[in-house]
Image (spheres, grey):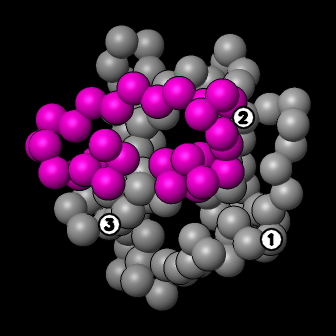
Amino acid sequence: ESQTIRFSYHLGNCHIDVPKRDEDRYFISAEELFSEWVKREDVLEVPIGVDHLGNKVFFEFSSSDSPHLLIGGTTGSGKSYALETILCGLVTTYSPKELRLELIDPKGNELLKFD
């Protein structure tokens, strides 16, 4: 069975959607990610997963090149869980002096634990 790869262009951005087959999906626990991670003092970063070679993948929020994060996916694909994992990792790793969050929750129920 072939996969449908979709392309779209909007406002100078290119979006390429390559859906994964069920046999290509893999899962990693947040506990595993954060237990093996060593916080760096010079950047604000958080581990988000592993690549196809097993190397840790990080988001670095301290760079002026990465001020925004967009998490996309289909219903039930884990977007809310991914966001919660990132936020939990940030608030448990960094002190209030190091990190200040301003969170907007349009649904009013996704980010209640961060009140």
Contact check, label 2 and label 1, Cβ < 8 Å: no
Camera-side residue: 67 or 95?
95
CA gap, disc 2 and disc 3: 26 Å
Residue 10, given in percent of the width and then of the height, sits at: 33, 19
| Residue 22 vertical placement versus 75 (above, below) | below
Residue count near mark 1 (Cα–Cα under 10 Å), binned few <14, some 14–19, many ≥20: few
Residue, x 68% and y 14% (percent of image)? 64
Mark closest to the chain's N terminus, 2 or 1 = 1
Q: Position of residue 63 (x, y in %)?
A: 72, 22
Q: Say if the magenta span includes residue 27.
A: no
Amino acid on which the number 2 mark rests in the picture? Leu
Q: Residue beneath label 2, please?
A: 44
Q: In terms of secondary structure, where does tag 2 sit? A: loop
Mark 1 or mark 3: name the one nearer the start of the chain.
Answer: 1
Q: Amino acid at mark 3?
A: Ser
Indicate whether 87 appears above or below 61: below
Alpha carbon of mark 1 to alpha carbon of mark 3: how far? 25 Å
Mark 2 Cα shell of 10 Å, populated few (<14), some (14-19), many (≥20): some
Provide the secondary structure element on which disc 3 rests: loop
According to the picture, the residue beneath numbered tag 1 turns out to be 36
Q: Which amino acid lies under the numbered mark 1 shown in the image of this protein?
A: Glu
Viewer-nearest residue: 37 or 28 = 37
Compare marks 2 and 3 and give the one earlier in the sequence.
2
Q: Is residue 65 above or below residue 46?
A: above
Is disc 2 in contact with disc 3, using a CB cutoff of under 8 Å?
no
The residue labelled by disc 3 is 77
Q: Would residue 18 be visible to someone looking at this image?
A: no
* Residue 104: image location, x then y, percent: 27, 30
- The residue most toward the bottom is 23
